[in-house]
Image (cartoon, rainbow, N blue to C red):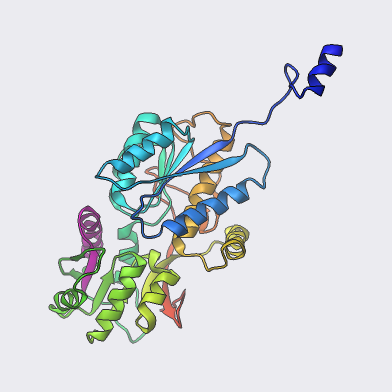
C-alpha cells in the first residue's frame, strides 16, 4: 500500500491502470502544386476537430507533400504509412497522386479515400478504397442532358479545355465516354498549361469549330480566367464545368463571365441536413470564408476515416472497411457501391450574381 501511495505521489502509473488510447492518425497527401491545397487542408482539419468532440481516441492529421519528380507523391504517402503510422490516407484530386497513393495502399492494406474524379481510380482493384467525389463522366452526362431553361436547348456540339499531360488525358477519356452515351459531338479537347500562357490563342483554337457549348474542365482559377477570355472573344454559348468550380476562386476570377455557368451539384439529403449545417457553420466561424466544394469533400473524407478507424479501435480494418450504415456528411449521406464509387444523385447548379444556385429546367 505504501509503495502504491509513493508511486502516485511521484506521478508514476499503477500497474494495470488505464491510460489514454493512442491517437488515430489520418494522412493527407497534399502536393505543393495542388490548386485547392488550402481548401483541402482546412476541410480535413475541421473534420478532425469535430471528430474530437465525440468520445473515443483522439484523431490527428498528418499532412505531407513535397516538390519533385514523378513518384515523389508516392514516397510521401509511403512515409505517412510507414513512418507516421497513419491508419488511413486521403488522396488529393490529382489523378497521378491518387494512383501513387493507391499503390502504397495496395502494399500496406491501409484504407484510402480518394478525392480524384477520374474514372480510372476505382479501376485499380484496391478493395479498401473509396472515391468521395462524383466521377468526371457522371458530371459530364448531366451537363450533356440538362438545359438551363425551356428556351435554351442542350448543346449538341461541345468543345472542352482540359489540363495538359496525364491529367488531361484522363479527363478527355471520361468526357468522350460521356459524350458518346449522350450522342453529343465533342471536339478533341484542347490541353492548356497551368501557367495559362496564350489564352487568346487557346480561345481561337477552341472557337474554331463554332461549338455551342464549352466545358471548362480545369481548376477554379484557370477556369475563371478562361471563361472571362472566352466571353471577351465573343462566345455567347453555354459554359459549364465540374463541381469543383463551385468556389469563390472561380467566381472572383471569372467576374461577370461566371453568370450562367453550369456545374453539377449533389442533391441534398434531408437525413444529412444537420451534418451539412454543422460543416458550413463551423467552416465559416473558423476560417471566416465560404467553403468551396473541395473543402466539403475533404471534410467528409476525414470524417469517414475517423468513423472507420474508431470502429476498429486502431486495428487494420478488414477488406470491407466501410460502415454498415450510411454516414451523414457535409455533402450528404456517404454511401458507396461495390467498386468504391460514391452513390449519389446529381442536380444542375447555375451561377447567378456570383453564387451557384439550383437550376430548374
Residue 177 image-quadrant placement: bottom left
Q: Taking 49 as reference, is 18 above or below it?
A: above
Tell me what residue is drawn at x 43 percent, y 66 percent. Answer: 265
Majority secondary structure of magenta residues: helix
Quarter in which the C terminus is drawn: bottom left
Q: Position of residue 259 (x, y in %)?
A: 38, 82
Q: Is residue 175 magenta?
A: yes
Q: Give the mark count.
A: 0
Residue occupying image coordinates x 58% and y 66%? 284
Q: Quadrant of residue 101?
A: top left
The answer to whether 267 is drawn above or below residue 154 in the figure is above
Residue 267 x %, y %: 48, 65
State the quadrant of the N terminus: top right
Residue shown at the point (46%, 63%) measured from the top left: 293
- Asked whether 280 or 19 is in front, the reply is 19
The residue at 33%/87% (across/down) is 151
Examine the rendered structure and indicate whether residue 173 appears above or below residue 143.
above
Specify the farthest residue to the right: 2
- Is residue 112 in view from this perspective? yes
Q: Position of residue 9 (x, y in %)?
A: 82, 23
Residue range of the region highlighted in magenta in the rendering: 158-181
In the image, 263 versus 13, the foreground residue is 13
Q: Is residue 203 left or right of residue 3?
A: left
The location of residue 186, given as percent across then percent down, is 18, 69
Q: Is residue 172 magenta?
A: yes
Considering every residue shown, the one lying at the far front of the view is 10
The answer, for residue 148, to whether it is visible in the render is: no
* 87 horizontally vs 197: left or right: right
Amino acid at each position: 500500500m505504501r509503495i502504491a501511495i509513493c508511486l502516485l505521489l511521484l506521478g508514476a502509473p499503477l500497474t494495470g491502470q488505464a491510460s489514454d488510447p493512442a491517437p488515430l492518425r489520418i494522412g493527407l497527401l497534399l502536393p505543393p502544386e495542388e490548386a485547392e491545397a488550402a481548401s483541402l487542408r482546412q476541410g480535413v482539419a475541421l473534420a478532425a476537430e469535430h471528430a474530437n468532440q465525440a468520445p473515443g481516441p483522439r484523431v490527428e492529421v498528418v499532412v505531407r507533400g513535397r516538390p519533385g519528380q514523378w513518384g515523389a507523391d508516392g514516397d510521401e504517402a509511403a512515409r505517412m504509412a510507414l513512418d507516421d503510422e497513419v491508419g488511413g490516407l486521403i488522396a488529393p484530386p490529382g489523378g497521378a497522386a491518387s494512383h501513387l497513393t493507391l499503390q502504397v495502399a495496395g502494399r500496406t492494406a491501409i484504407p484510402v479515400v480518394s478525392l480524384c474524379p477520374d474514372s480510372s481510380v476505382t479501376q485499380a482493384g484496391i478493395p479498401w478504397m473509396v472515391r468521395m467525389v462524383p466521377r468526371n463522366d457522371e458530371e459530364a452526362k448531366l451537363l450533356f442532358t440538362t438545359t438551363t431553361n425551356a428556351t435554351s436547348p442542350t448543346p449538341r456540339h461541345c468543345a472542352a479545355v482540359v489540363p495538359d499531360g496525364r491529367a488531361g488525358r484522363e479527363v478527355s477519356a471520361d468526357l468522350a465516354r460521356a459524350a458518346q452515351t449522350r450522342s453529343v459531338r465533342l471536339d478533341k479537347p484542347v490541353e492548356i498549361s497551368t501557367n495559362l500562357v496564350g489564352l487568346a490563342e487557346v480561345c481561337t483554337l477552341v472557337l474554331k469549330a463554332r461549338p455551342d457549348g464549352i466545358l471548362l474542365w480545369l481548376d477554379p482559377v484557370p477556369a475563371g480566367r478562361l471563361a472571362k477570355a472566352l466571353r471577351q472573344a465573343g462566345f455567347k454559348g453555354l459554359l459549364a464545368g465540374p463541381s469543383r468550380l463551385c468556389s469563390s476562386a472561380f467566381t472572383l476570377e471569372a467576374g461577370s463571365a461566371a453568370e450562367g455557368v453550369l456545374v453539377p451539384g449533389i442533391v441534398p439529403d434531408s437525413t444529412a441536413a444537420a451534418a451539412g449545417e454543422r460543416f458550413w457553420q463551423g467552416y465559416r466561424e473558423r476560417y471566416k470564408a465560404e467553403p468551396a466544394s473541395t473543402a466539403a469533400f475533404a471534410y467528409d473524407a476525414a470524417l469517414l476515416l475517423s468513423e472507420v478507424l474508431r470502429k476498429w479501435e486502431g486495428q487494420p480494418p478488414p477488406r470491407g472497411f466501410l460502415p454498415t450504415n450510411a454516414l451523414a456528411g457535409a455533402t450528404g449521406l456517404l454511401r458507396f457501391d461495390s467498386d468504391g464509387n460514391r452513390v449519389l444523385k446529381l442536380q444542375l447548379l447555375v451561377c447567378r450574381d456570383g453564387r451557384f444556385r439550383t437550376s430548374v429546367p
